[in-house]
Amino acid sequence: MNYIGSKYKLSNFIKSAVHSVVGTDLSDKIFCDIFAGTGIVGRLFKNEVKKVIANDIEFYSYVLNKNYIGNCKPIKNKEQYIDELNNVTPAEGFIYKNYCLGSGSGRQYFSDKNGKKIDAIRQEIENRKEEETINNNLYYFLLASLLENADKVANTASVYGAFLKHLKKTAQKELILKPANFTATGNEHQVFNADSNTLIKQIEGDILYLDPPYNARQYGANYHLLNTLAKYDRFVPKGKTGLREYRKSQYCSKLSVNKSFEELIKNAHFKYIFLSYNNEGLMSVDNVKTIMSKYGKYDLISTNYQRFRADKEKNRNHKANKTEEYLHILEKN
């Protein structure tokens, strides 16, 4: 998924930093990714550590992490389930009625054909869960597969803050459900859907990785339709963009971010803490250093990084296409 703040391209940078500080043998370590997003960093360490704890306040992230992190044993006949869902009869459900142009909603997040297919697949997944013909592991695997493949045919500039007036080429393609394949491990892992500052008081481990929002963009607004697809609940969409109610993060406000961040560090029962942040974030390097240094030995490394661009064509010649990504490191007292 083309995701704001994704650490996919920074995977090697993050992994080598953790190895250099903690060591290359992490087999007895508990690794926590408490702002997990799509779970890229947790997946990176899933095979290396004793346990991964993944968390995110957004429900679509919870679904993705229940699959990619929570699923640790192979699923039998998963391709058969994918094939069956690809052949469901289209249905005019909540997504079509509220987020497709043909329904009269005035919104065009998906083509009419894809909207009906998304509804049909989503309803079938839920029906099978209610009938107990699939277990939780398979449920989250199928739901994660739908989220990822629906996102590929969404008629947006990568985020769901708005839809495009005309169907772009990728949105004109037919939705084909493909499996969200995960890494099977012998160890069990934990996945939460909680506020990070609340959860931090209830867990403990060895390595804590932090990737909070950097700026005022609220993930609940930018990815509201993924939450709607994941929950598939009923509500009255608001405004032109069809927003749902969402929880605002304290990390997206300059007034509250420093206090929330220090509370998180203070309450963390982890020896090693790594914070990803960049030079455009609400907290300055000096802010972060001052806070983290209170609680142990502090260090900082950085790398240049290709910035997230929702509209690649429009921003092709933008002078700030690269940003400096910081990795703040704390060995806690």
Image (tube, rainbow, N blue to C red):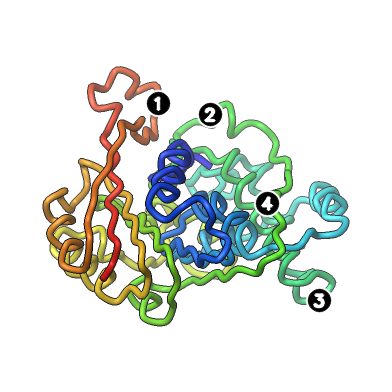
Of callouts 2 and 4, the N-terminal one = 4
Precedes in sequence: disc 3 or disc 4: 3
Looking at the image, which is closer to me, 232 or 73? 73
Indicate which disc, 3 or 2, sits on the residue closer to the N terminus.
3
Can you give x and y, in whole percent of width and height, for residue 212 in the image? 33, 57
Q: Mark 4 sits on what residue? A: 145
- Residue name at image x 30 percent, y 62 percent: 331
Q: Amino acid at mark 3?
A: Glu
Q: Is residue 152 above or below residue 298?
A: above
The residue most toward the bottom is 202
Query: Residue 105: percent from the left, percent from the top?
Result: 51, 51
Picture coordinates of residue 244, whole percent (x, y): 43, 63
* Circles 3 and 4: CB atoms closer than 8 Å: no
Mark toward the viewer: 3 or 2? 3
Q: Nearer the viewer, residue 29 or 139?
A: 29
Q: Which residue is mark 1?
A: 312
Question: Element type at marker 3?
Answer: loop
- Tell me: 141 left or right of 204: right
- In this rendering, the label closer to the viewer, 2 or 1: 1
Q: Earlier in the sequence, mark 4 or mark 1?
A: 4
| Badge 4 element | helix
Residue closest to the far top: 317
- The local secondary structure at tag 1 comes to loop
Name the residue tied to disc 2: 168
Instruction: Give the residue type at disc 4.
Output: Ser
Real-space CA distance between mark 3 and mark 4, rounded to the nearest whole angstrom: 19 Å
Inter-mark Cα distance, 2 to 1: 14 Å
